[in-house]
Image (spheres, rainbow, N blue to C red):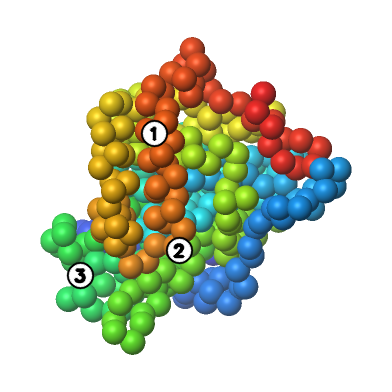
Amino acid sequence: MIFVNGVPFDSDSSSSSQSDKLVALMEHPMLVAASNSFKAIPERKFSVPEDSDPGRMPTSKWVYLFQREYATVDPNLVDFVGTDEATTCVGLAIRNRQSGMTSVAHMDSPDIVDKGLSQMISLVVDNSLDADLDVHLIGGFEDFSPKHGNDNTSSGSDENDDGYSLPLCTKIVENLRRRPEKFHIQTLFVLGHNTRWDSEGNAYPIFHGFVVETSTGSVIPASFDQSSRCPDDLVRRIRITSSYEDHNWDGKLLETYDRDTDTFKIAPCRWTERQERIAKVLRTKSDSEILHLCSTSPSAEGPDFVENERRKWEYLIDHPDWRKTFPRGQPRVFERTAEGDWRRC
């Protein structure tokens, strides 16, 4: 069940389509105001200096999530939890008002919404349907056909014209509306709210990421770099692609982090000889070809997208047997050091 400003929300007409209900929610005055406020917040950049003193005290502790990953964190152990690199993907944050437990996911497909929401909520509500849950959706942009126009209420019936962001946002909101838990929507910075246009009419996301400050529940636009997208970034990037062929992960978000021990437990994922062959072909392509072959939004990707794809393919070629990366099929476990870095156990 969805609440806005403490009041149950539903569209006026029971016959409204799911996308119409999303539009109605986006047009709610409180959520429009929240989007405008979020847009005005300066983006926070997370980075670890290369010349950091090994004995330094950490300034803050964060948990970073890649595409299709999720994590639930304890505010007593973690200061921030967030994600970036989102274009057509959507970041979803759910926070228990009473306990402060916060779950964040980087949703990349409508196919993972049903099970993914259940995974997130299982560690946030502790089997109680009475908990009040604050919800923030951030990401996605107007990547659909220009014939729909440039207003944030556009929608279309043709699947190709809908792009990737609209079906994903629609599925998330519809699932929140149908579930029995009490979801208080605080931020709905998606689609038109998260779109800027250049002089030629091309659409781009305003923000690619965010963090939740776990002690307060505040959401902040955020970006990360290779030093702060950790630990084990290459293996976790490979899991994104491999999970689509590993049926153990059908319809699920990728398990990544253990809330109770503040450790990363990167669950194993199998990759195949087919993926190694594809990697060998793709690494010969030009940067432009890679963008168009590997991205749902080639013109909107970050400057390090191609570099990260090439790094991933080199790892696959050098490590063709997934069992060498996940010996005995066990997770790769990383614990946080006193300085706030990560060390493999």
Residue identified by numbered label 1: 316
Q: CA distance from mark 1 to mark 3?
A: 35 Å
Q: CA distance from mark 1 to mark 2?
A: 22 Å
- Of badges 1 and 3, nearer the viewer stands 1
Q: Earlier in the sequence, mark 1 or mark 3?
A: 3
As shown in the figure, which amino acid type bears the numbered disc 2?
Pro
Instruction: Using the rendered image of the protein, determine whether residue 166 is visible from the camera's viewpoint.
Output: no
Q: Nearer the viewer, mark 3 or mark 2?
A: 2
Q: Total number of numbered labels? A: 3
Where disc 3 sits, the SS reads loop
- Percent across and percent down for residue 313 are 38, 40
- The amino acid type, in three-letter code, at marker 3 is Ser
Q: CA distance from mark 3 to mark 2?
A: 24 Å
Q: Which residue is mark 2?
A: 303
Q: Residue at x 64, y 65 (%)?
A: 44
Q: Earlier in the sequence, mark 3 or mark 2?
A: 3
The quarter of the picture where residue 125 lies is top right
Q: Residue at position x 62%, y 50% from top?
A: 227
Upstream in sequence: badge 1 or badge 2: 2
Q: Residue furthest left?
A: 158
Whether residues under marks 3 and 2 lie with C-beta atoms below 8 angstroms apart, the answer is no
In the rendered image, the quadrant that contains the C terminus is top right
What residue is rendered at 33% in x and 67% in y? 299
Residue 318 is situated, as x and y percent measured from the top left of the image, at 42, 31
Which mark identifies residue 145?
3
SS category of the residue bearing label 1: helix
Using residue 197 as the reference point, say whether residue 160 is left or right of it. Answer: left
Residue 87 visible at all: yes
